[in-house]
């Protein structure tokens, strides 16, 4: 798995984006912080849940906890997020090293109007210096900050329908891939890697059940 990259997963509702994030973080094998605004991540042995950023802050500022987080490669799931508390979370993550930061439903926090002052902006632009991988999901690429799309290394599309998303794919890798992306089946994805090479893959039920 590629390290210190930004992955953007974009596509239609219910086509397996969130599940794919779980596959990616498992392969990435780094301690992970998950911003989970819609309570999508389930209990697992290696996961800890925080009902607010305040609770997460208290946990992560304790050095014993931090050691446990790194040693056991835990996944820390932060719920109860709004724009303000996400900013607080991103600022905490920005101070960390060698982790993955996964944000489900990024459009809630990094809309096109996102400014340079946002900690998530800094994470996008400078996080790789601290070995921070970023993984995000969104239903529409038009709803997310251009700062994120322009810095993304690996874009992964599930089925797309919106004209803007199709135009984006066309401009990015070519018209022929629009035809691929609009007929993708559930749990199938079109990935464009950092060398602009396209790959099609399926997250099989077997892999989905493993994570
Ligand atoms: N590869 C898979 N095989 C079988 N079931 C899957 C697979 N991936 C996801 N699912 C199931 O399909 C449903 C939708 O998946 P998921 O929540 O990942 O989609 P999503 O694209 O994130 O949807 P949304 O846009 O609503 O957030 C879930 O119940 C999930 O458990
Ligand atoms: Mg989802």
Image: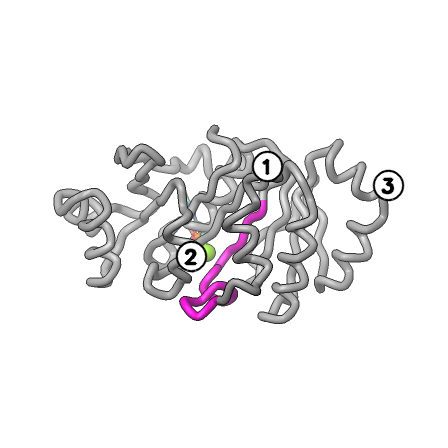
* Residue 130 painted magenta: no
Tell me which segment is drawn in magenta. 101-114
Within 10 Å of disc 2 (Cα), the crowding (few <14, some 14-19, many 20+) is some
Label 2 beta carbon less than 8 Å to ligand 2: no
As drawn, the label of residue 147 is: 2
Q: CA distance from mark 1 to mark 3?
A: 22 Å
Q: Which of the two discs, 1 and 3, sits closer to the camera?
A: 1
Q: Quadrant of the C terminus?
A: top right
Q: How far from the left and from the top, in percent, is residue 153?
A: 40, 41
Q: Closer to the camera, 190 or 84?
A: 84
Residue at (60, 51) in percent of width and height: 34
As drawn, the label of residue 64 is: 3
* Residue 108 painted magenta: yes
Q: How far from the left and from the top, in percent, is residue 201?
A: 32, 35
Q: Of helix, strand and loop, which one carries label 2?
A: helix
Q: Closer to the camera, 211 or 205?
A: 211
Q: Earlier in the sequence, mark 2 or mark 1?
A: 1
Q: CA distance from mark 3 to mark 2?
A: 35 Å
Residue at (48, 60) in percent of width and height: 105
Contact between marks 1 and 3 (CB within 8 A): the answer is: no
Residue at (42, 57) in percent of width and height: 147
Within 10 Å of disc 1 (Cα), the crowding (few <14, some 14-19, many 20+) is some
| Residue bearing mark 1 | 131
Q: Of helix, strand and loop, which one carries label 3?
A: helix
Q: CA distance from mark 2 to mark 1?
A: 19 Å
Q: Which of the two discs, 3 and 2, sits closer to the camera?
A: 2
- In the image, is 33 to the left or to the right of 184? right
Q: Earlier in the sequence, mark 3 or mark 2?
A: 3
């Amino acid at each position: 798995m590629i390290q210190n990259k930004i992955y953007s997963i974009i596509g239609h509702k219910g086509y397996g984006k969130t599940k794919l994030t779980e596959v990616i973080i498992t392969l990435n094998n780094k301690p992970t912080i998950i911003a989970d605004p819609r309570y999508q991540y389930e209990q697992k042995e290696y996961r800890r849940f925080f009902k607010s950023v305040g609770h997460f802050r208290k946990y992560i500022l304790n050095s014993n906890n931090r050691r446990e987080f790194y040693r056991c490669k835990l996944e820390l799931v932060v719920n109860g997020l709004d724009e303000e508390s996400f900013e607080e979370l991103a600022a905490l993550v920005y101070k960390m090293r060698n982790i993955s930061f996964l944000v489900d439903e990024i459009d809630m926090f990094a809309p096109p109007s996102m400014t340079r002052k946002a900690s998530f902006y800094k994470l996008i632009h400078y996080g790789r210096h601290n070995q921070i991988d970023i993984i995000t999901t969104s239903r529409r690429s038009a709803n997310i900050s251009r700062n994120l799309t322009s810095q993304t290394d690996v874009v992964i599309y599930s089925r797309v329908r919106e004209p803007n998303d199709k135009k984006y794919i066309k401009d990015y890798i070519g018209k022929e891939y629009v035809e691929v992306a609009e007929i993708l089946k559930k749990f199938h994805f079109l990935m464009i890697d950092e060398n602009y090479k396209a790959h099609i893959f399926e997250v099989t039920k077997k892999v989905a059940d493993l994570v």
